[in-house]
Amino acid sequence: MVHFVGAGPGAKDLITVRGLSYIREADVIIYAGSLVNPELLKEAKSQCSIYDSAYMTLEEVLDVMYAAEAEGLMTVRLHTGDPSIYGAIREQMDELSKKGISYDVCPGVSSMSGAAASLRAEYTLPEVSQSIIITRAEGRTKVPSGEELSKMAAHHATMILFLSSGLAKKVKEDLMAGGYEPDTPTAVVYKATWQEEKIIRTVLERLPEEMEREGIHKTALIIVGNVLDGAYEKSKLYDKTFTTEFRKGKEEGI
Ligand code: SAH
């Protein structure tokens, strides 16, 4: 059996309880060495075979899984954050399915949640933005037409850009071309929840210079939107006049 496990954003204790118990039971671990905290590997059994997928192709990763299966061993495929977001797990799962190998997925804390915690931010504020656009700037990996940053910008929703920290100038230009104001609040979180985390709070127009100044070119999220600053409405859920399934609202003035 293969367990795809989300390792969380970085801090060792931000893996789920389930994910940690799979690591402790695993006979084989294949981890994404560029972003998974190696401290987690100390939890593995001493006889566990450990592979860093940063140096491996898809075929090599699959071959390790097939060999483990042939011996009846349990494999953990450890991905950064939550595996469902830019995790490249589908291509692995499809090949396992073809071979009749069973697998499951253990979710993880995405770096976007880690970054929100580090920023002490709420991505969805009433009257400001009730939507989150998770996307990336187009680089070597193409983005389907209709998902260009300039088109996404038209929504003025909270935008979280993965895999784009080397493309800050393009992010700024495309979002401004799409209608984001130059002074839209913007944050960069580098290595969210790791010891070496760095936070930049700026405005969209200044994004490339600020990232250059801090020397941030990878392992960062760019977050853009008015939720990072400014006015908002309080949530209706906790408003004293609002009736919910669990609580009867009181009339104004009582
Ligand atoms: N599945 C992961 C994302 C993998 S794609 C998740 O849910 O977080 C890799 C990209 O994620 C990086 O280029 C960077 O944009 C972002 N990333 C991953 N870990 C990060 C962290 N600790 N802090 C900031 N960004 C991170």
Image: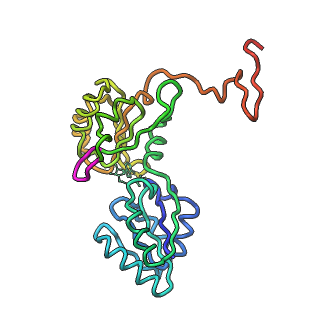
Residue 227, x across and y down, in percent: 45, 29
Q: Residue at x 37, y 37 (%)?
A: 223
Q: Residue at x 53, y 62 (%)?
A: 106
Q: In which image quadrant can residue 50 be found?
A: bottom left
Render colour scheme: rainbow
Residue 8 located within the stretch drawn in magenta? no
> Magenta residues, as a range?
137-143
Of the 4 image quadrants, the one containing the C terminus is top right
Q: Is residue 203 above or below residue 149?
A: above
Q: Is residue 41 visible?
A: yes
Q: Residue at x 47, y 45 (%)?
A: 113
Magenta region, main secondary structure = loop
Residue 217, x across and y down, in percent: 25, 47
Residue 41, x across and y down, in percent: 44, 69
Q: In which image quadrant can residue 233 be found?
A: top right
The total of numbered circles placed on residues is 0
- Residue lying at the far bottom of the rendered structure: 71
Q: Is residue 11 visible?
A: no
Q: In which image quadrant can residue 63 be found?
A: bottom left
For the residue pair 231 and 42, the one nearer the viewer reads as 231
Residue 75, x across and y down, in percent: 47, 75
